[in-house]
Image (cartoon, rainbow, N blue to C red):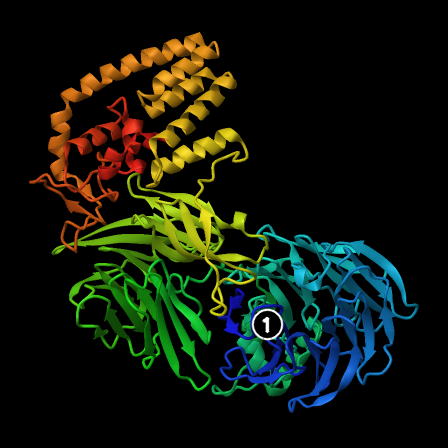
Amino acid sequence: MKIDSKPLRYAHAEGHTDVCYTENGQHIITCGNDGDVRIWVDIEDDDPNSHCVGESALAVCYKEKRLYVATDNHVVQAYTFPAFDKDGIVTRFTAPVTQIKSSTKIEALGCSSENMEAKLCNLEGGAPLFVMKEHTGPVLSIAICPHMKYASTACGDGNLRIWDIDTQKIVKQVSCVPKINTFYAAKVLCRMDFEPTEGKYLAYPNNREIILLDCESWGQRMTFTHNLIKCAISQCIFSPCGEYLAGNTVAGQIAVWEIGSGACIGIVEHPTSHNVTALAWNPKGNGVLAYCDVAGQLGMLVNCYGKDSTAADNNADDVEMVERADDNDDIVDDLIENYESDDDNAISLQKIKNETMGVVEDHGDSRPVSRHQTPAPSTVPAQPPFQPSSTPTHLEHRYMCWNDIGIVRCHTAENGESTIDVEFHDTNLHHGIHLNNYLNHTMASLSSTVVALACETPSKLVCISLVGSSKEWSASMPDTEEILCVAAGAAVLAVATNARLLRLFTPMGTQRQVISLAGPVVSLAAFNTAVLAVYHSTDPGYSDQHLAMDIIAMNGRQVRSKTVPMPLTPSSKLAWLGTTDMGSPCAYDNSGILRMYDVASGVWMPICDTNTHSKGASDSWFIVSVSEATQKVRAILCRGASFPATAPKPIVAELGIQIPLCDMDTEKSQYEEQLVRWAHTTADVDVKTARETALKLFALACRSEIEQRALELMELLKDDRLLPLAAKYASRLGRVHLADKLTNLAEAWDNETDKLNVAQNTHFQELDTQETYDVTNTEQDLNASLIIPHKVKEKKVESDTSLRPIASAKLVSLSAKWTRPSRDAYLAARGSSRSSFSNSISSNARCSISLRHASCKVF
């Protein structure tokens, strides 16, 4: 049975968070950066007991009906459990306490601190039993042998030290810790653990593997790793029985190994890839592992032993947990002999044993035979639906939507009352809106014409119009449907339900269409009359989500659609969906890659890697909007988190759009990147800049003595104004043959133009059947189409925004109304004009055809 992950729960404020279990496994105890200690009955406990111990609490440990908490006063404070009354101070430090560790078999506490000391303390306080002082950096973690023979510490000076408690000397030192000067800057905590039953082994993380040391010889016994582990392992911990070992990486991966065989039982990805700060096994021995992350969230893994944790919990009430497999066999055999019954209604312990241990009964032989079962390959869970640019729903103060129009916030008070605030970036569009959230709306979308609010139960859509006199309207879904996603555009509003239906409305509430999606919805986005619907095209694989996107548009009474696959980085999930300011679909995954769909060529292009703009491994970016005109991505940096806080209001940064070509540190690749980017995006670039970049690239090829590359570049650009300059430059460098070839190239262009002009009439006769993607032409009906069979009867001046062809096989870009300049630009895009590159970036061409659809499209 594969390892299963429970949904994350908000536990504490962002920052280092710690977790432990009570000795009977009945309660989970957490502490965090908000200074609270919370006691949970289970991860699904909606009302944990919360106790404030100060401004922050970095560590917590349970021992013999007492809680030991590291408070912001740099002390280890004892509390009674469950009354939570102060019960003395165990020890004091001069800097924050980083970890508190104990074991069921020892009567002492191990405490580490940032003041370069670690202590072995008596549970009742007093003078410490052993002070470990030979550190030259902050002590990150501590572990104690169950026989109180050895202790181990990991320090920010780069070393792991093993101490003999009796002689109080170092017996071994290992260099395996990344060097840091403060605990708060540590990504790798290097938390090690002694084998809990006999203390024969010490496990510690070292880069991407966990090393097992023999405590007698201090030699390396085994190593545990896996090819799916992406980065450094931060900590490791033995299971209560000592037969399993769990570890986590700084990217949030949690892996479990079986000690005896060394096999990896499974690897679970953190839903938001946050660094895990603490791990704790349930002492019941049921294969349940609790963890906390730097975002203050509490999570849980079940079936970590490869067995059903629920069945193990039920059996624990009847059979006392033992630590070795041989003992388990003896006890089960005794129970079978004493309690086996022939009654049909009796519980057969033999059957339970056979089903659990994989034993097959052979009626011809009295001995059971072990059956080897090949486990079925595990798949990742399907990504649930989400709202782009929103934060988790369990937060008291959260963003419901943040885009280029404005911000929608939701605030929930302690008494359960909720309010919604709508803030507009441009107050000329509309004044701010304040609403009482009586229906407990959890979803919101904002456009220039409407504010859309929705909730799952009761499944009702409420919209506030930003234009006209009628301000509010609502629509209730059928009883069998629940709203999962909502999206608002300037001229369309979409709702996706759990019945895999997409319901389309106008901004004023007219129902337009009901569409069946081909899979469970993941997210929605809208722009003008276009709707983007992302859904699961097939079941997820072993590590990847399989998504597809429908581009749906309305044109009067017509609704047209186009389906495209949705690419994602391996082992990642979709984190944001939207469009650029020009209407190009964009998608961002949780690995930090932003992609744009080039509707002219029908391909997805990576346009920004946000990881290059992050300093910390746990940092992430919260996408707000994408602008093709300015070539910028507006986003918010979330340090150690996946979403921004509501207070103070975060600062929106601008990241440059960049195509990830090879060798970007070279001058050649930088010029090539600019030309490629201008070719496939609607960049606001002038003729002079484009020609200078092309000429610099030509000069680099000439200086590198690669004449054929220089000639190839001019053939691709097809700019008759740039060609004389290139020929003149080649002559100055003494490249006579190259200059002659460039001169002949101009003549070849003239011949090609004459040949293509013969077929010009045929080309334009075909235009009547071409389909175009015009999402911004305001001269058409408000429900202008993304995809329509377009027939031109009048010649009108078109809008100054770019057009988006989707299904056209022959057009590169075509305006809604064809004028003579637009025909010239079309021929340029077909490669039939000598001055296509200059025409594509001239002001006349920009009026009817975007740069991305010009002749430099050849890139």
Q: How many marks?
A: 1
Q: Nearer the viewer, residue 616 or 235?
A: 616
Residue 194 visible within the image:
no
Q: Nearer the viewer, residue 357 or 454?
A: 454
Q: Is residue 282 left or right of residue 394?
A: right
Quarter holding residue 677: top left
Quarter holding residue 501: bottom left
- Secondary structure category for the residue under label 1: strand
Q: Is residue 576 above or below residue 724?
A: below
- The quadrant of the image that shows the C terminus is top left
Image coords of residue 513 (percent x, y) = 17, 62
Label 1 neighbour load within 10 Å: few <14, some 14-19, many 20+: many
- Residue at image position (42%, 55%) is 545
Q: Circle 1 is placed at which residue position?
A: 290
Image coords of residue 668 (percent x, y) = 49, 29
Image coords of residue 724 (percent x, y) = 35, 16
Q: Nearer the viewer, residue 741 or 373?
A: 741
Task: Name the kind of residue labelled 1 in the image.
Answer: Ala
Residue 520 visible within the image:
yes
Question: Residue placed farthest to the front in the image?
Answer: 428
Question: Residue placed farthest to the left in the image?
Answer: 793
Quarter holding residue 763: top left
Image coords of residue 552 (percent x, y) = 23, 54
Q: Is residue 164 above or below residue 335?
A: above
Q: Is residue 350 left or right of residue 813?
A: right
